[in-house]
Amino acid sequence: MASGFGAPPGQPAGYGTPQQSFGTPPGGQSFGTPPGGQPYGAPMAQQQAIARPHAGGAILSADGVEKARSLRWWMKLFGILNMVFGGIYCASIAGAMVGWLPILIGYWTMKAGDGIGTFAETGDGMSLENAIRSLRNIYLTMGITFLVGVGLGVLFAIIYVVLVIGVLGAGAAMGNF
């Protein structure tokens, strides 16, 4: 049996190629799933309750579907609260400089919640992809904001130390006259 680019020894040509859908090796069996088709480690009753195939051959158990539905509700609540408090921040001139961030994060959170809920109910892979894209935007924005905050904190700490040393040095110099 000939092996293609990136194929493990003994695997047919084309294993792992871009033409193949991600997460589905030849034969249609998804990664992390034994030959019987049930996910590893799941209790048998749970495996039989819901075995709905989703994007990439993944399977959500009944518990996974319920958690995704619950997550949708909490993400929408968190998104609405972010947008409300962002609007309150924007009521002041100084708050408007940063108030748009919670509004944007709230919007993305609501979008991600909708996508996760739709994926849990219909198995639509595009909904999950859109939810992941929104979550990426949220964490990327929060990460950049955090790094900028740390950078400004370090800068202000350095300025503070320099000013304190300058004031103390000037006071000491005046005491010598």
Image: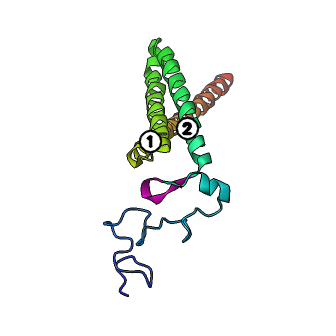
Residue 123, horizontal then vertical, whole percent: 45, 47
The quadrant the C terminus occupies is top right
Q: Residue at x 55, y 26 (%)?
A: 77
Residue 122, horizontal then vertical, whole percent: 45, 43
Which residue bears the numbered disc 2?
69
The label on residue 31 is none
SS for dot 2: helix
In terms of image quadrants, where is residue 10? Answer: bottom left
Task: Specify whether residue 156 is in view.
Answer: no
Three-letter code for the amino acid on which mark 1 is drawn: Ala
Q: Is residue 55 magenta?
A: yes
SS for dot 1: helix
| Residue numbers of the magenta segment | 53-60
In terms of image quadrants, where is residue 43? Answer: bottom right
Q: 101 or 30: nearer the eye?
A: 30
Q: Residues within 10 Å of mark 2 (few under 14, many from 20)?
A: some
Q: Nearer the viewer, mark 2 or mark 1?
A: 2
Residue 121, horizontal then vertical, whole percent: 48, 41
Which residue bears the numbered disc 1?
131
Which comes sooner in the sequence, label 2 or label 1? 2
